[in-house]
Image (tube, grey):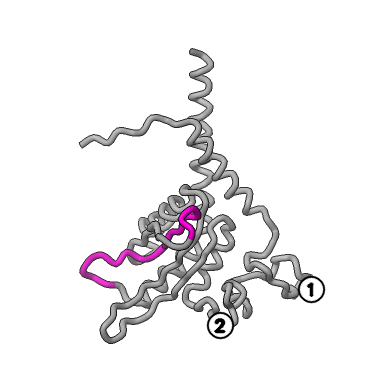
């Protein structure tokens, strides 16, 4: 069966370009990834700059959670939560570092649920983790799936390991993958955003020129 490409929709493509530009512009922001943090940084004794901000910050596990005093982010998933916060436009709303199987229940894989107001951003996440798999940097496929949670007008998605197949990964392997994804996701997503931004602009310009010439 031959799969035909959809005809270009210039209005849709322009919307994609705007979303990609918004994502790339957001990386220029100087505010801290952890919302509401007022700790003074060591180098400048400032409550504003992010020069000392890292996921290894002693306060990050509490600060990254909306209920940090009672439910801090688990250490095994904290670097990935941090990366999503650093991407600015993909807001994590729930995470789990994964847990071993208990009596009568299956193992729970690491996962992260996030909000986004552009359907393009989850696609960039999915492409990024596929790239890491193809580069053999992670041990198994990870997937991005739509997740019915909260206000359906603000779409939520889950990033998690694919558990299909006979060979089930260990929790250690999955947490290792989560760490690799955390270290590489931001650069992979931004590289893909620039690539698609250039490709979409070329299509829009070409179609506009052809319309003007006809």
Residue at the spot x=21%, y=69% of the render? 166
Q: Name the residue under label 1.
A: 45
Magenta stretch: dominant secondary structure: loop
Residue 199 horizontal side relative to residue 46, left or right: left
Residue 85: image location, x then y, percent: 57, 63
Q: In which quarter of the image is the N terminus?
A: top left
- Write the residue at 31% across / 85% down: 102
Identify the disc placed on residue 207: none
| Residue 107 picture quarter | bottom left
Q: Which residue matches tag 2?
A: 70
Q: What element carries label 1?
A: loop
Region in magenta: 151-168
Eyeballing the image, is 203 above or below 180?
A: above
Q: Which of marks 2 and 1 is in front?
A: 2
- Indicate whether 132 appears above or below 73: above
Residue 105 in the image, given as x and y percentages of width and height: 28, 80
């Amino acid at each position: 069966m031959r799969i035909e490409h959809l005809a270009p929709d210039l209005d849709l493509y322009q919307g994609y370009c705007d979303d990609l530009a918004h994502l790339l512009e957001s990386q220029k922001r100087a505010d801290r990834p952890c919302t509401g943090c007022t700790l003074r940084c060591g180098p400048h004794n400032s409550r504003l700059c992010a020069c000392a901000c890292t996921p290894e910050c002693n306060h990050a596990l509490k600060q990254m959670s909306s209920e940090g005093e009672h439910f801090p982010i688990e250490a095994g998933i904290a670097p990935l939560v941090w990366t999503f916060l650093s991407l600015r436009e993909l807001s994590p709303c729930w995470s789990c570092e994964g847990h071993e199987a208990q009596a009568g229940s299956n193992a729970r894989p690491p996962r992260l649920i996030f909000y986004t107001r552009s359907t393009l951003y989850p696609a960039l996440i999915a492409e990024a983790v596929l790239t890491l798999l193809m580069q053999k940097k992670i041990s198994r496929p990870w997937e991005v799936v739509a997740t019915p949670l909260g206000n359906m007008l603000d779409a939520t998605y889950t990033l998690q390991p694919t558990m299909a197949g006979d060979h089930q990964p260990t929790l250690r392997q999955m947490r290792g993958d989560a760490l690799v994804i955390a270290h590489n996701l931001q650069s992979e997503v931004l590289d893909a955003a620039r690539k698609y931004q250039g490709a979409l602009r070329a299509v829009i310009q070409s179609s506009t020129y052809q319309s003007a010439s006809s």
